[in-house]
Amino acid sequence: MTQPPNQPPHGGGFGAPQDPGQGGGYGYPQQQPGQAGPYGYPQQPGPYGQPAQPGPYGQPAQPGQPPQQPAQPGPYGQQPGPYGQPAQPGPYSQPTQPGQAGPYGQQPGYGYPGPGQPGGPGTPPGGAGGGGKGPFKGRTAVIVAAAVAALLVAGGAVYAVVGGGDDDGKKTESKKKNPKSSAPANPGDGSGDGYAGKEDLNEGRQADEAKVLWYKEAPKAPGKGADAPGMWVKDGIAVKAAYKELLAYHVDGGKPAWSAIEFPQEICAASPQYSEDGKIAVAYKNGIKSGADCNQLQIVDLKTGEKGWKKEIKEEGLFDSTLGLELSITGDTLMVGRSQSGTAYSVSGGHEKFVARKKDEGACFPAGFTGGDRMLMALSCGASTPTEHDEIVELDPESGSTKWTKKFPKGWRLEHVYSTSPTVLYATNQDKKQWNITTLKPGSSATRSEVQVNDDFAPECGWGGLGRDLQACAGVTADDKYLYLPTKKTTGANEIVAISLDSGKAAWRQKSPQDTSMLPMKTQGGDLLAYVEPSYDSAGQVVSLGTSGSHTPKTLLKHPAGTSKIENGFFSKAFDYVDGRFYLSTTRLSGSAQGREKLMLAYGK
């Protein structure tokens, strides 16, 4: 598996107006993915703008400790380090596939990365190559006809679900004896052709392996491709957006939970979170032209599929734009972010609560929002002036009043919020090729700690249409004691590093149980849940790691080896583990003419 793609050069869109020559922002045509972003080796953080304090990497070893290994060479000459410090070297990765972010990291469906932007430490903005959460994965699709043929011979023909799984209620029975009822259809060899080699995906499954509970194919997308944002699992129903449709399946068996909702035009945004009463927000375009606005907003109940209130989102000023929206939910408040403002609505009632506009006589513009436990707003201030800087504020989700404000030094850009509770911020300095991860004290802008760990971290992050998607990172999570970050996979297994939120230092680390990346998902019941990614010939698995005591991974689900190529073929994906089941879905449809594309897989016991 690869690292997240680089961020395209910063440009317009969400935030202050940019000088001529800078790229477009939210809603502008996105760049194609370039090379994956680098993840550096943090040094001992020093004060903003002050000479750096010595960092442990490359320094003489402390008594009783082994010497550190030299860092690997990488781009920019050097890899970024924390505020005000010389950067450390670190490697790049590989090109990525296009696609929009999926949920992962926050409540309902986690983070929700979008097309490629910097992800982990050492990923400064404006790096080489465009981004385009073509999100996270950098593998090229591989079509293996021989493997498909072998599967066909081995599995024979059995009950197969045709088209979109059992959505249409039609099944075709073969001549094989003793067919397995409701056998999931084979979506092919991972190449994206959903019609190739239909068979029982559980054929040949070993006793210690999980089952493929069900498989679904995607609606046909246009040749230019289409987004498939969001994945929500709640109260026994899994909901997925794809192109113009919102689809819902019972987690047991995969039968439709309610009739698919088809919107007049393609879906252009969705809230990664759901509200207190189980509702999400979906936005779709107002036309078919390339410049159509993303301004049609619809509330949908996840349990029933019923449509709630609908609004056309207006622009709030001369430079405000609805070419794209950023949707996030905190409690009963939906924030609709635009290019230079944001409007908060009641999810349950539909009435406007407040508008987040530019401040300081127009010097600061909204540049991104978060949902979930806290409503945070990034501000871009003083663009193209000597006082240019970023700020982040916490807003009261009911009134819009500011609870606290944190200012970043000139040259530092807030890229992502790794966690809202606790608040963990990731910022970069393009000129210095440096990065910083800061944890704030509860309910305050005061610093609790800064990361001081020398590792090549590789969370999977994307970028949103507003230029920066604050919650676009997968593979990173936090609890009240630790920040959990994955290291970059090189020639073998990677590691998860637990970093103390009090000291910023590594508390413990654990190696992946197989030679692929292990990505933190969330903490639950005193354990860290992680997804061990597949390879072409090795299936993935879900494991738990104790956050105290032994950290040895315990297997919760071992995915069947016979589906490794299929699982490995979800290049742009969202994933979640809920109530003993693992859900994997695509977040970008290619519009391939080869047939129906994969949409979603569910594993369980």
Image: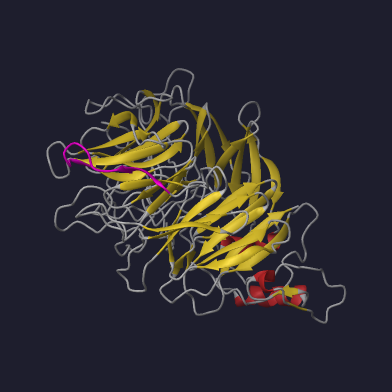
Residue 360: within the magenta? yes
Q: Position of residue 148 (x, y in %)?
A: 65, 75
Percent x, y of residue 310: 44, 58
Q: Residue furthest right?
A: 178
Q: Nearer the viewer, residue 18 or 76?
A: 18
Part of the protein shown in magenta? 351-364
Q: Is residue 235 above or below residue 298?
A: above
- Residue 347 is inside the magenta segment: no
Q: Considering depth in this image, is 323 or 318 the residue closer to the camera?
A: 318
Left or right: 208, with 120 as reference point: right
Is 63 drawn above or below residue 133 in the view shown? above
Kindly identify the residue that appears in the image at 67 percent across and 74 percent down. 168
* Residue 102 can be seen, yes or no: no
The residue depicted at 32 percent of the width and 62 percent of the height is 31
| Residue 428 image-quadrant placement | top left
Name the image quarter holding residue 385: top left
Query: Measuring 36% from the left and 55% from the top, which residue is drawn there?
Result: 325
Q: How many marks?
A: 0
Query: Between 21 and 166, which is closer to the camera in this rendering?
Result: 166
362 or 136: nearer the viewer: 362
Answer yes or no: is residue 602 visible: yes
Query: Quadrant of residue 566 in the image?
Result: bottom right
Answer with left or right where residue 352 lies relative to residue 144: left
Q: What colour-coding does the image apply?
A: secondary structure
* Left or right position of 52 against 200: left
User: In the shown orientation, is residue 191 left or right of residue 556?
Assistant: left
Q: Position of residue 85 (x, y in %)?
A: 27, 31
